[in-house]
Image (spheres, grey):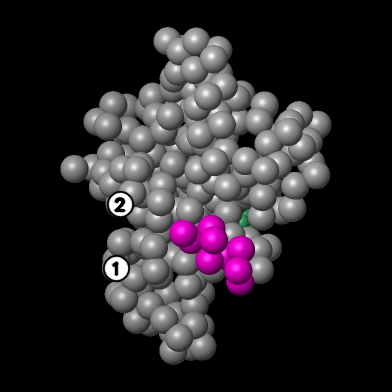
Amino acid sequence: MSILEGKGVTKYFGGLAAVSNVDFSVEKGEAFGLIGPNGAGKTTLFNLISAAYPVKSGIIRFKDKDITGLKPYKICRMGVARTFQIVKIFPDLPVFSNVLLGLHFGHSSGMSSAEKASLALEYLDFVGLTQVKMAPAKDLTLANQKRLEVARALATGPELLLLDEIMAGLNPTEVSQAMELVNRIREKGITIIMIEHVMKAIMNICQRIMVLHHGEKIAEGSPREIANSEKVIKVYLGEKAHATC
Ligand SMILES: Nc1ncnc2c1ncn2[C@@H]1O[C@H](COP(=O)(O)OP(=O)(O)OP(=O)(O)O)[C@@H](O)[C@H]1O
Ligand SMILES: [Mg+2]
């Protein structure tokens, strides 16, 4: 069953078609990869799904409901959460408060303050930040700031989580830890769309991958199909990555 569907999704910045007539369908419970060269339109597509930007044309449906044109907070409360390519934490607030904000913002309106606080601690534990829970968010390492963004997004109670390059800038050990975290999120039944340039992660975690290039979808398929696609190798993966996939 499809949880998220896009038809003809298009976004222009001036004369530039950042996302051009893209169709996609993400199945409930899957991990769906979104890859492509720099400037391909990946983050813009997340911005359209989460309504940070309005679409020029096309339609986006979440759980069969048309969410095109809804306000971002409504989409979040319906069950779509995201992280940001460049982390957008509240730097001076404690780590714990950053997560609590996710609970206040998301669809947890029936909960008491104590219940929200207890749940925030659970999310911190889930992403491995319990030990730094009272530190100002700005004092965390990049890897931990990315984990904090994941925790805050999870705290809104999503059924669909959009992860924008949560592994960028991490060392190999941190990448392995982030991969393990993404797998545990999926085990909770949360559907994931992940943008990543770290091919090891995309190829290992995702069941299906969509490739964008100059705003257009140029390929979609299983990791094996994508790794062997001549078009994708030519514009993005290169022969070296192809050999190691
Ligand atoms: N707010 C904006 N205003 C104008 N142009 C933009 C804006 N956001 C993105 N673009 C342009 O749209 C195109 C797609 O950008 P986008 O950030 O979606 O690419 P991306 O695939 O996420 O790339 P990367 O892998 O580098 O993150 C690029 O040409 C970019 O310069
Ligand atoms: Mg991007």
Q: Where's the N terminus, which quadrant?
A: top left
Q: Amino acid at mark 2?
A: Glu
Task: Judge whether residue 88 is colored magenta.
Answer: no
Q: Which mark is residue 222?
A: 1
Q: CA distance from mark 1 to mark 2?
A: 12 Å
Q: Amino acid at mark 1?
A: Ser
Nearer to us in this view, 43 or 18: 43
Q: Residues within 10 Å of mark 1 (few under 14, many from 20)?
A: some
Q: Residue furthest left?
A: 1
Element under disc 2: loop
Which residue is labeled 2 in the image?
30
Task: Judge whether residue 177 is colored magenta.
Answer: yes
Q: Main secondary structure of the magenta part?
A: helix
- Which stretch did the figure color magenta? 172-180
Nearer to us in this view, 158 or 53: 158
Q: Residue at x 58, y 47 (%)?
A: 128
